[in-house]
Structure formats: C-alpha cells, structure tokens
Image: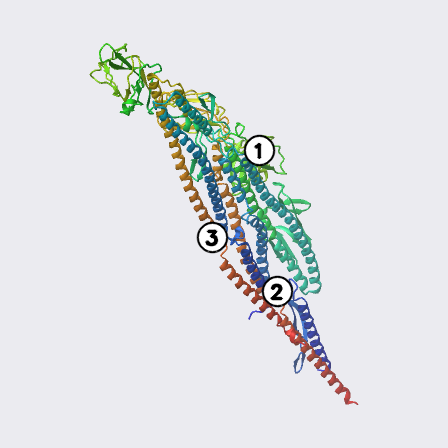
C-alpha cells in the first residue's frame, strides 16, 4: 500500500484541474480565433508551409491583378486600332471613288478634303493616350507624343520600339503595349517585295501594275540589283505604230535585253497593252549573252509614249502618313487630261497597294493583340483557380475543424467538471470530521 | 519493587505520550510547510531493573525525534525539479518569440508580400506617381516591420540580462542562507548530539530552491555541513562561508550579460557551457540557441533583401533619366572588440557576397602572429596571418593598429541587419522602373531582323560606357560590324539568330534574317518613362533564391526562422510536459515517505491521547496502591 500525504492529494488534484483547464482554454482560443495553429509551436511544419503558401497565393493574386492591367491597356490599343481600321477602309473607298473618270475637278477636291480630314483623324488616333495621359504608341516614352507633324504631310515618329511587358504568370510576360513604329511606320511599299512607279513627266497614258514575284528565290538571289527601269519607244514611222520597250539595270545603266548600253530605241521587246513584262531573259528577242532571271513580272496598260519609263525598285518602309499624304497630293493635283488621268491612276494604284499593306499591318497587330487578350484571359482564370487552390491548402493547414473542436470543448468541459467535483468530494473526507 | 517504580513507569509513559502528541501536533501544524518531513518520536524501553526474580521494566523512554527522510528520494525530486525549472524558464522565454511570430497578419510575411505587390504595380504602371509612392511606402512598412521584430528580440535580450541579474541575486541569497544554516546545524548538532530536524529541512529546502536556479553539486561534510559547488567546481558554499556570483556585461559582447565568480575580490568569468540546468542555464541556452539565431537570421533576410534589391535597382533608370540609386540602406555587419584587448587593432567586416552569409557569429582571436576565426554555430576554425580575408561572404580587414596576443573580436555579420534596414529614397521619381538602354531597328531596314529591347548585365555598378550610342551594321546576312565608344569597333562579327550580343554592359538579341545594310542601334533610354523592364526584374526577385547560397528566397528564409523557433518551442513544450509528470511522480514517491497525512495524524492523536489516559490510570492505580498502604495504619 502506498502512503498518501494530504498535500499530495491537493497537489495532484490541482495539477489535474490545471491540465484540464489549459486544454479547455486552448480549444476555446482555437475556436474564437478560428485557427488550428495558434503559434508556430503547435505545428512548426504547417506554420512554415502556410507562410510559403500564403506568399504563393499573394503572388498569384498579384498576377490576376496584373492581367487586369494588361487587359485594360490592350483593350485601349485595340480600340484605337479599330478606329484606324475603319478609317483606312474609308480611305480605300475614297481612293476607289477618286479613280472614277467621270469625276469633275470639284468632285476630286471634295474627295481630297475628305481625305485630309481622315489624315487629321489618323494623326489623333496614333497619338491616343491611356487613362493616365500616357501615350499608347510611343514605346517606352510614355509622355512623348509619338507622332508629330513636322511640316504638312511629314510626320516623324518620336517614340521608340519598346514594348512594355506585364507578368501574367510565374513564367510568362506578355506585351501590353505596341510601339507606334511597328504599327504605323514600318510598312513595306508596293507588293512588299518591290514597288513599281511611273516616272514623273511621263507623257503617255501607261498605267503600271504593282507586279508580282513569280520566283522568290530568283528575286532574292545575290546578283539581283533590285533596281530597274522599263523604258518605252513608239515607232510612229510604221502604221500602226509599234511600241517597244527595254529593261535597264539602274546600277550599271546597261540594257538587260542586249547586255550593252541602252540607246534611244527602238528596243528588242514589243509592247502589248496589259501584256506581261517579265524580268527574265526571253530569247528571242533578247540578245544578251548573259541570261538573267529575277523572278518577277509586271504589266503596263494604256499607251506609253516615247521616253516614258517605269521603275521597279525593292520595297522600302513607308509610314501610313506618307501613304495618305501621297494620295491626297495625287488627288489634289489630278489633271483632267489623258496623261493626267494616267498619272492619277498610277498614283491611286500605288496608294491602294500601300493602303492594303497598311491595313494588313494594322490587322496583323490587332490579331496579335487579340491573341494576347485571349492569353491574358486564360492566365487570369488559371490564376484565380490557382488562388482558390492555395486558399484551400491554407485552410487545410491553418483552419479549424469546428465540429471536432466543439465536441472537444464539450468533452474537456466534462473532464474539468468531473475533476472539480471529485476533488471537492475527496477533500471532504477527513478523520478530523469525526473527532468531536 | 515498590509503588514508586509503578509511579515512575506511569510518569515515563505519560511523558512519552505527551512527547508523541507534541510531535504529532508539530506534524499537523506543518502539514503544508514546504520541505517539511514528517517526524516521529522514537520510543524505547528503559533499561530494566534486575532482581533476584528477573528483570523488571522501568517504563518507556523517548530516544529521539526522527524525520522521515530518504536522501535518494529527495535527490530524485531535486534533479527532476532542476530540469523542470530549466524547461519552464526556456519555455516561457521561447514562447515570447513563438507568439511574436504567431499571428499570420503581424509577422514579416504580409509586409514582404505587400511590398512586392507594390513593385508589381509599378511594373504595370511605371509612370504612375501613386504606384511609385506606394512602392516607397510599402518599402518603409517592410523596413519598419523588420525593425519592430528586431526591437522585440532586443527587448527579450535585455529581459534575459535583467533575469540573469535577478537569478544571480537569488543564488547569492540562497548560498548565504545555506552557509548560515551550516553554522547553526553544526553548532546545535555538536551540543545536543541529536539531529536538528527542522533546521535540516530548511537547509534541504534551500538546496532544492538553489537547484531550481542552477544545477549544483552538494557534498555533505563530516560535521554535518553542506559544501555546494557550481559550474566547473567553483565553491559556492563551504562550511559557514558563502561565495558569490555576479552578472555583468560580458567582455566579448557588452550587450550580453555573462556570469562571473567572485573570489578574493577578483572577478573570474564562468564559461557559459558549464552553467547547466535550472533557470540560469535555461536563460543562457535560450540566448545562445534561440535568440541569437532568430535575430541573426532575421538580420540576414534584411541584409540580403536590401542588397539584392539595390543591385537590381542600380541597374535601372529612374524617372529623371539617371541610373538608379540604392533603394534600401544596406545594414552593415558589426565587429565587437573584446573589452580586455590590449592591442590597438581595429577590424572591419564588410559584406562581399550577401548570398553567402550564414547567420552565424564568429570569434576572431590573435595569438603569436596567427589569427584564428571560429564560426560559433559549429565551431569550425580557420587560421590566417594576413588581411583581408573573406569567409562566408564577409571580408575582414585590418583598418588600423596592431593586435596583441590574446586579443579577440566578436564578428556579428547579420545581428543588426533587421535593426538597420531602411528605405534610402523618398522621391517617387527616383524609383528605377526603366532600363537605361533601349534598342531599335532602323526604319530603312530591308531585312526582317528584329532586335530585343535590351537588358543590362548584372552585377552593378553598370559599365561606364553603358549608355553610349552603339550601331550594329550588317555587312551581309551573316556578319555585322559594331561601332561605338567602348565596343572596340569589331568588324565581321558572326550573326546567330537570337544569340546574345553583349557590349558595354548590355545584352541584346537579334532574331530573324537581317539584310546587308540593315542597321540596329542601342543607346540611352531617354524619356523612357513608360518602360518597366527593371521593375519587372525587381518584382521577380521575390521568388529568386538569393539567400543562403541560393537555396532560399526571402520568404522561405523567414519561414525557416519560424519553423526552427516553432520546432524548438514545440520540443521544449513536449519535454516540459514530460518533465512535469516526472516531477509529479518523484514528488509523490518522496511525499509518500515524508509527507504528512492528516488522517494518520488524527489517528495518532487518538492513539497518544489514549496512551496518555492509560498512563494516567497507571498513576492513579499506583496512587491507590500507595493509599492502601497508608490505610493499613489507620
């Protein structure tokens, strides 16, 4: 039998009640805080893990906010470019209208006026700003006006080629802006490989086509000077008059048909209206001992006069404002003569090619913006999903199982009550109670 | 035989019963006295009287009053309590850090996350003044959070110093009392030749109390006095002589108190490692194991954050078009010169590579021309003869003077990191969100080559020629020439699509097929207010593993502190619970022998009362017998 000391009965009783109270208090604390983890000591691994998960969640939420900002700025760009698209379609219609031979001089000048207003509108759209007054299309230089009209018809790009990026997921940055140079400035002329132009001062009615590349490899071959002139000669001594043409390599000045210097004419190839002019040896009639093939064709329609010539040059970049200004100038200066009509047609053809190229470029940028908007949307919804996932992981790590805790609380309460009641009972027992 | 002897027997019984009643009353009175051992009056028969017909008893005699004492059981309680007190004190100290890190909304994490969110906002709106202001403000909030955590830890350090002083005062008082009791006990014992039970109880209780403060070893001397030894065998009590300890700023680090032993007026430091157990041992262990580690590691997060953020910030360009400045003030490590140094050497410690910082402190000591550097976390040493030396990302150099033999220095590379971090800029335009260079393709280019926006190579400082205009001119589809100050104007450089082209501290990539004559230029990012390239890189630092040799990011380095403190607190709590149960068990065993049971004492009261009454009856009968004799003559 173990001897029990009276103070032990008290100490043990108090010790047990303290244990029960502290367990009860902890459960009560957990319930009132709604957290399983009151201090890191409760579960050190879960505490550290929950910190890292909460950082991942915060970052993911930030990505979702970033996608909002990307969506906003891409949306602004797309709006502005939608305006540009409509405007260019108007301009194309006006250019087609200007080609109507029945138009009077005043009709043309009203078309020119309409074109001028479009030009001003375009300048405004290219200088669009976001909600903070920052220019959309000036690259990195948000407070620099991207397109400034230095003199009538001459617009300079003052921004740069920078594209701002936004972090939309851990591994992906998406461009949220596009540089004005890429949208409005770097647009190839002609058929994008070469451009055909009627030389100013032509006296005939020849209208040159934009031409096509039939063999890209031949055009890009190393020996191609990419700079030619097609010259015409009309032999009026015979009836009907015979028109012949020569193709001159502008870098050497020699005729590609003969291999020698190009004279005054007549030339080796005979011209037919709208017939194909091939930039390749056609023997006969060509006599050049060194055959050439630059893989391109063009055609001229109408009746060129002696000395009329058309150039074929490699495409260069031309901005949208120059294209529009050239069109306005051509419409403005149109003469109601046969030669003037041909000049106008040639100018309108050039303008149509360039406008098509411009429109294609705008649509290309808009398609790219659309793709990015889709990507940003997808990134946002996946960020939201991920954030939910992190939230549920966090909740698993930190949050309390209320049902379990409340039943624990009830159980601990009963334990404490039992300890208190039994303590009072046991302490009531003393032999001294019976000593009277 | 006569009636007189019956009288005497009755009286001896009466006396014995009275003595036992007195002892029982003493037990009842001291039922709740700490350290009291129940006493019993030991009775024995008087020597008998020999007669011709045999030996007649002469009654009872009280031989001694004995306390129910077992050295084994008392020592078991004492040992358990020493460890229990150690764990309780450690637990109450570490709970403070544990609670400090407990609240998920009050730790470092929310401030860290808000700061990087604000950097992302700047990346999304690089020219927005409110976004920039938010980034600076959140940087200040983050610094303040670091400082607040550090202040709490420093307060705990001050608290430890205060408690060390208090504990040492108590130890000295206990030692003094034990010495006094030693004197009384040896005096009383030699005079009475009986154990002074209550004095012994008192002394044993003092020894038990002392052992709750610090573990001691007690040797009982032949004269009954206790000799008490502490630490490495330093005498705390010898006979009636008590020696004292003192708590004072340590020579190695004046911010931390250490314990010294005062002997003959000289103060000798006691090695911390020999002061084990009890609350004193717990305070010292808590400081070196948990507090130093937490404060150093928190400081390391602050230093690495400040330095790596600055490194990237200084590669950027602010709203005014200047290269970025430091965003944070980077805290420096500190070197504490030992107060006992006799030489004049001044040692400097600078961070040369923050990623390599360990969070440990170091002791640098000089002897016979050789410097020895000891990493205190694992006691690895390295020796060298000359400065500068770089160890674990810290470069040590001799600023001035010369060291004398035995000089030592305490190097704390990260201790003050969290205290000293602050935001260095206040002007929103100084946030370097942009990159200082940009690249462009000439409008007249005929090829379809595209050039990337360009990035600045780390580490800072940026190349002096960084913002010089550089032109890349393609001479064919596969080669290009480079012109511009600082590039060395190379010609005929081979072109690879998307290959890195690096000059003057920047890198760009050209993709696609450029044509001969195509020109690309790289130059200053003048007026690049909407550029966010550097802000994106700054925001990206949040998840880059920059701490502890590239094994942890800022957040995980902080989580490491939380989990290591949590683990330690948890461990201590579990041990403490187990130890409480052990104390409870050993106390129960000790009380089972030595404790007072009131029921038992009540029964004893009745027993000795009855014995008293019975002996009284004996006297009454003896008296009657005597009266009978007297009545014969009447």
Residue B447 coordinates in the image, percent (x, y): 36, 24
The quarter of the displayed image where residue A369 is located: top left
- Circle 2 residue: B69
Q: Disc 3 and disc 2: Cα gap in Å?
A: 55 Å
B454 left or right of B516 in image: right
B445 left or right of A279 in image: right
Residue B222 coordinates in the image, percent (x, y): 64, 59
Q: Disc 2 and disc 1: Cα gap in Å?
A: 73 Å
Residue B568 coordinates in the image, percent (x, y): 53, 50
Q: Toward the viewer: B13 or A153?
A: A153
Tell me if mark 1 has few (under 14), some (14-19) or many (20+) residues whose alpha carbon lies within 10 angstroms of its own.
Answer: some
Mark toward the start of the polypeptide (2 vs 1):
2
Tell me if mark 2 has few (under 14), some (14-19) or many (20+) residues whose alpha carbon lies within 10 angstroms of its own.
Answer: some
Q: Is residue A148 visible?
A: yes
View extreme (left): residue:
A284
Q: Are marks 3 and 2 in contact (CB under 8 Å)?
A: no
Quadrant occupied by the N terminus of chain A:
bottom right
Q: Disc 1 and disc 3: Cα gap in Å?
A: 41 Å
- Circle 3 residue: A396
């Amino acid at each position: 039998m173990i001897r029990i000391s009276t103070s032990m009965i008290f100490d043990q009783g108090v010790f047990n009640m303290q244990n029960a109270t502290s367990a009860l208090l902890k459960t009560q604390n957990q319930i009132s805080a709604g957290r399983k983890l009151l201090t890191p000591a409760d579960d050190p691994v879960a505490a550290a893990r929950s910190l890292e998960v909460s950082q991942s969640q915060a970052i993911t939420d930030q990505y979702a906010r970033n996608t909002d900002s990307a969506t906003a700025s891409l949306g602004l760009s797309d709006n502005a470019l939608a305006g540009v698209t409509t405007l260019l379609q108007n301009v194309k219609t006006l250019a087609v209208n200007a080609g109507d031979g029945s138009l009077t001089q005043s009709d043309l000048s009203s078309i020119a006026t309409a074109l001028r207003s479009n030009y001003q509108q375009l300048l405004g759209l290219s200088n669009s700003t976001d909600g903070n007054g920052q220019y959309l299309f000036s690259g990195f230089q948000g407070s620099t006006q991207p397109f400034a009209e230095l003199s009538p018809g001459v617009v300079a790009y003052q921004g740069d080629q920078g594209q701002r990026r936004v972090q939309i997921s851990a591994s992906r940055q998406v461009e949220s802006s596009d540089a004005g140079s890429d949208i409005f400035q770097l647009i190839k002329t002609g058929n994008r490989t070469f451009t055909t132009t009627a030389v100013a001062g032509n006296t005939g009615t020849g209208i040159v086509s934009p031409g096509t590349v039939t063999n890209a490899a031949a055009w890009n071959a190393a020996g191609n000077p990419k700079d030619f002139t097609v010259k015409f000669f009309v032999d009026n001594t015979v009836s009907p008059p015979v028109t012949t043409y020569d193709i001159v390599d502008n870098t050497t000045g020699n005729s590609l048909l003969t291999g020698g210097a190009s004279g005054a004419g007549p030339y080796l190839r005979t011209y037919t209206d709208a017939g194909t002019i091939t930039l390749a040896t056609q023997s006969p009639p060509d006599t050049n001992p060194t055959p050439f093939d630059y893989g391109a064709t063009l055609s001229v329609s109408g009746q060129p006069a002696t000395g009329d010539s058309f150039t074929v040059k490699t495409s260069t970049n031309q901005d949208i404002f120059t294209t529009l200004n050239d069109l306005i100038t051509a419409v403005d200066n149109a003469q109601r003569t046969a030669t003037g009509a041909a000049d106008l047609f040639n100018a309108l053809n050039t303008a149509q090619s360039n406008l098509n190229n411009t429109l294609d470029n705008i649509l290309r940028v808009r398609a790219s913006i659309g793709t990015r908007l889709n990507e940003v949307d997808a990134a946002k919804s996946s960020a939201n999903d991920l954030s939910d996932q992190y939230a549920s992981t966090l909740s698993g790590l930190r949050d309390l199982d209320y049902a379990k805790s409340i039943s624990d609380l009830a159980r601990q309460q009963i334990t404490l009550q039992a300890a208190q009641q039994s303590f009072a009972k046991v302490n009531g027992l003393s032999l001294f109670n019976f000593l009277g | 035989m006569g009636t007189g002897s019956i009288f005497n027997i009755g009286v001896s019984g009466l006396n014995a019963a009275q003595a036992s009643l007195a002892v029982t009353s003493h037990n009842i009175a001291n039922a709740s006295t700490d350290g009291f051992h129940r006493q019993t009056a030991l009775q024995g028969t008087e020597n008998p009287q020999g007669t011709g017909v045999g030996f007649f008893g002469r009654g009872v005699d009280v031989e001694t009053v004995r306390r129910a004492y077992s050295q084994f059981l008392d020592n078991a309680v004492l040992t358990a309590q020493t460890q229990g007190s150690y764990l309780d004190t450690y637990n109450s100290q570490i709970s403070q850090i544990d609670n400090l890190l407990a609240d998920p909304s009050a730790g470092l994490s929310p401030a860290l996350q808000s700061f990087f969110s604000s950097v992302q906002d700047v990346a999304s709106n690089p020219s927005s003044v409110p976004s920039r202001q938010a980034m600076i403000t959140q940087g200040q909030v983050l610094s303040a959070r670091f400082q607040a955590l550090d202040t709490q830890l420093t307060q705990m350090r001050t608290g430890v110093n205060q408690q060390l002083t208090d504990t040492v005062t108590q130890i000295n008082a206990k030692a003094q009392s034990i010495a006094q009791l030693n004197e009384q006990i040896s005096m009383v014992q030699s005079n009475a030749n009986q154990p002074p039970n209550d004095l012994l109880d008192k002394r044993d209780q003092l020894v038990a109390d002392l052992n709750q403060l610090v573990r001691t070893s007690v040797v009982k001397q032949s004269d009954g006095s206790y000799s008490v030894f502490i630490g490495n065998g330093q005498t705390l009590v010898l006979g009636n002589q008590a020696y004292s300890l003192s708590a004072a700023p340590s020579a190695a680090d004046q911010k931390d108190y250490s314990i010294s032993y005062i002997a003959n007026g000289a103060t000798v430091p006691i090695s911390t490692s020999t002061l084990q157990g009890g609350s004193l041992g717990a305070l010292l262990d808590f400081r070196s194991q948990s507090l130093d580690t937490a404060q150093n590691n928190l400081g390391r997060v602050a230093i690495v954050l400040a330095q790596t953020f600055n490194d990237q910030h200084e590669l950027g360009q602010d709203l005014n078009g200047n290269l970025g400045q430091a965003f944070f003030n980077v805290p420096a490590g500190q070197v504490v010169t030992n107060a006992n140094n006799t030489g004049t050497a001044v040692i400097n410690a600078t961070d040369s590579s923050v990623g390599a910082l360990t969070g440990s402190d170091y002791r640098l000591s000089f002897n016979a021309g050789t410097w020895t550097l000891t990493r205190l976390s694992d006691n690895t040493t390295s020796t060298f003869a000359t400065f500068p030396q770089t160890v674990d990302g810290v470069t040590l150099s001799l600023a001035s003077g010369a060291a004398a033999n035995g000089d030592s220095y305490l190097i704390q590379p990260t201790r003050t990191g969290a205290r000293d971090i602050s935001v260095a800029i206040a002007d929103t335009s100084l946030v370097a969100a942009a990159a200082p260079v940009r690249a462009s393709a000439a409008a007249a280019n005929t090829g379809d080559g595209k050039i990337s926006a360009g990035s600045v190579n780390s580490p800072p400082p940026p190349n002096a020629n960084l913002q010089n205009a550089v032109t890349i001119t393609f001479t064919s589809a596969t080669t290009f020439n480079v012109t511009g100050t600082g590039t060395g104007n190379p010609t005929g450089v081979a072109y690879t699509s998307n290959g890195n082209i690096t000059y003057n501290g920047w890198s760009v990539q050209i993709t696609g097929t450029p044509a001969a004559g195509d020109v690309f230029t790289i130059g200053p990012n003048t007026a690049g207010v909407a550029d966010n390239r550097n802000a994106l890189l700054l925001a990206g630092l949040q998840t880059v593993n920059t701490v502890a040799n590239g094994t942890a990011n800022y957040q995980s380095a902080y989580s490491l502190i939380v989990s290591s403190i949590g683990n330690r607190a948890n461990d201590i709590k579990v041990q403490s619970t187990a130890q409480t149960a052990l104390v409870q068990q050993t106390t129960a065993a000790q009380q089972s022998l030595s404790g007072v049971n009131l029921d038992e004492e009540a029964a004893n009261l009745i027993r000795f009362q009855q014995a008293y009454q019975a002996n009284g009856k004996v006297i009454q009968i003896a008296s009657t017998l005597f009266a009978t004799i007297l009545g014969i003559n009447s």
